[in-house]
Amino acid sequence: MNKLNRCQKCGLPETYETIEFDVSGVCNICNSTEYKQKTINWQERLFLLDSLIEKYRGKSDYDCIVPFSGGKDSTFQLYYLCTRYKLKPLVVRFNHGFMRPVISRNNERTFKKLGVDVLEFTPNWRIVKRVMLESFRRKTDFCWHCHSGIYSYPLRIAVKFNIPLIFWGEPLAEISAYYDYLNDTVEYEDEKKFNMCRNLGISADDMYGMINAPDFPVDRRDLLPYTYPQLRELKAINYCSICLGSFIPWDYVKNTELIKKELGWETDELEGVPAKLNTSCEKIECFMQGSRDYIKYLKRGYSRISQISAFHIRNGRLSKEEADAYRQLEGQKPPSLQIFLEYMGLTEDEFNTIVKQTTIPPYVHDYSRSAWADKTPDFDLWYREDNRPKGGP
Amino acid sequence: MLKRRIIPVLLLKAARMVKGRQFMDFRDTGDPVSAARIYNAQKADELAFIDIEASTDNRGTLLSIIERVAEECFMPFTVGGGVRTTSDIKSLLRSGADKVLINTAAIETPELIASAAEGFGRQCLVVGIDVRREHGDWRIYSHSGRQAAAVSLAGHLRNMERCGAGEFLINSIDRDGMMTGYETELLRVVRSETSRPVIALGGAGHFQHLADVLAEDYAHAVACASLFHFGDNNPIRARSFLKNKGIPVKNV
Amino acid sequence: MSFLGIIDYGMGNLKSICNAFNFLGRSPRLCSTPEEIESCERLIIPGVGAYQAAMRNLHARGMVGPIRAHAAGGKPLLGICLGMQLFSSVGCEPEKTEGFDLIAGEVRPLPENSHYRVPHVGWNAVSLLRPHPIFSGIKTDFDWYFVHSFHFITTVPEDTAATTEYGISFVSIVARRNILGVQFHPEKSQDHGLCLLENFGTWDGTC
């Protein structure tokens, strides 16, 4: 039987990455959030942001780069920088291949209402599938291309176009203890962070060596979009890659309400998450969200419902009892899993065998569970492959 | 209080990292310098590089990898594989290694350990011992597990300690790459036969395996390769897990 | 021209310390002659190995006098690991040998038993007994990397700036005016180690 130790406050289990419990059984992320809510002088931080922006304004073709997915965070950060600071940003979108229709609609509306230049990049799908499979097989996590691309590509554009200021959104301190509000005044989005927790411990050089084979020859340049720029190139442009959430208190619920109101930002459902819980639309920008969350559940015994609940408890919007009730709904198989298996050319048994490589004790999953979650309304619009080549070899 | 160490192991073959099972079936696991950079970002306690090809031809490659790692990673690292002479030890230390791992040569020419201890100090000497369980007993193997050694485990440990070994890296060949847990019985025997610090290697598959060894003090450090190469784990998560179990780990 | 010098006496991990300062943007000077030592505004004595061999090498290269003069002149002097131990009056590895005698005391083997094994190798905490400029900006609850079999026993309690627990409470930092010795390896202690070295690079020698 799986009895996981949980944070006395937010309910996240001991299998949550980087979680540590203090003597009262409260987790380090809750403690960091409390510091953020009670101790940080946000006015001072805002002054810092004001002066930082003026340092870079007008010095290049664009005042800054805003890496953009179209989710609630990047939409809010673009809105904030355009309206409060009247910056001229270059919006850089790395297309991970799983954009949902609602996001395309939201993006068009956002870009047109705010009036911004946008650069969109879609990587080679054949390579994407191959690295997804490799990353999944080795690390039981198929999102290598997405995270490596999202965090490297905008920096590559920064170097190419000489735009040193890059604004990210939510600090990691909001959801994990890789960084915390007490010790990390400003959270940078740099190569150290990339290596610490973004790229699953696999660099583009590593991945090239892992997938290049006689039956699947790969050009080293195919991995360029995932290659973090050299530090000397970044230093040469005097780069500054930072999280907006280090300067303003990040509250994604308030942020989402604002973009709904000001930009007509539309919401949608998530696989396996009750709509009532996710009114602020975490993670609606990726249709593989359900599969990703499911893999997390298989390994760690918790999923998106626990994460969203924990966040709401910390911000006083949900009670522990309500969270416990929601948690009973976790662990259902997502319909997107069928699509993932199709892309990869794997059966569900093969999938399970691969995931079993990673176990986070003490959780042990019961693989006989077979209930499927409901499809989301846009499921039939997601990209399907017919007889095209799968992720193999 | 001295903390328990978690040591990622990077096996090298022709300038790439590899990982196998029971010393066979090696797969490419990436570029060692970029791996070192990643482990450095994750504040790993120490790194161990072992060159499994270990020929005189590629010694230059290994040295250049170590030099590049030493330029940007400021944490301890141990390097081994094919170390046979004091000159080998000297060039590794000069390239930036803090400790040198010696395995086969320690069995064949134990006087190497004595002269190295005198010349460089025992704190930079780690004696590696590869062990298989055979007929209910522990058998030492040299030459990457290919040749059974005549000396007994207890005898070798005592001799090496006398010669000046600083630490012992005990590798279970049976458990290597299997990810089913360390060979704790072997570690218990070694712990009682030596008074030097012991590093366990071979078998880590998930964090509880690390906790099993460290909570009972079967070893003072746990070395892992497959755990970090295959599967969704990193030293930061390992530290959090062990901390929650009350095992003292490095404060970062 | 004033330099940050690293004493090269044939023992010790010079490369690591050089790499660390290069990484920090300071170009250190390797000193193997008295003239080179004299050209430095601050000096580091690294060291890994035996006390006796170290002093013998330093004497053979004529470095003992210039280093003493550097210290007497109030210029910052940092000893790392064996380098710190050489500041003592006397060591015993493998035989009784006189040290620099810059900080009174002797170097003896760490007591060992099956629980506290020697060498003391790994990450351990350092408890500062008083503030020191070299620790500016560094949190006090970090662990530092140690690897040694001997320890420094100070004669004058005020010379002990920090201790570390390993069965006994041994001296992990000695400090007297412009002289500072650390038993651990800052060049192997990652970010806070680099911070300490950077602080040494700008330290004016007072505390």
Image (cartoon, rainbow, N blue to C red):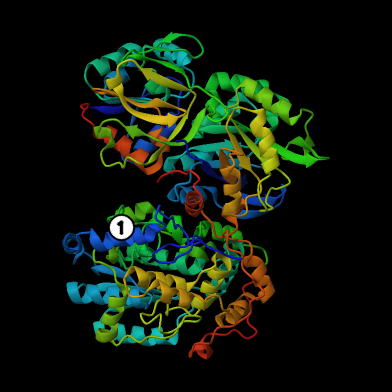
Name the spot of residue A86 as percent of width and height, x first: 18, 74
Q: Secondary structure at mark 1?
A: loop
* Residue A85: quadrant of the picture: bottom left
Q: Chain of mark 1?
A: A
* Residue A90: quadrant of the picture: bottom left
In the picture shown, does residue C109 fall above or below A74? above
Name the spot of residue B105 as percent of width and height, x first: 68, 29
Q: Is residue B13 visible?
A: yes
Amino acid, disc 1: Tyr
* Left or right for C187, reference B238: left
* Left or right for A192, reference A352: left
Q: Nearer the viewer, residue B144 or C89?
A: C89
Q: Nearer the viewer, residue B213 or A68?
A: B213
Circle 1 residue: A181
Quarter of the C terminus of chain A within the rendering: bottom right
* Residue at screen point 22% across, 17% down: C73
Q: Nearer the viewer, residue B188 or B134?
A: B188
Quarter of the N terminus of chain A within the rendering: bottom right
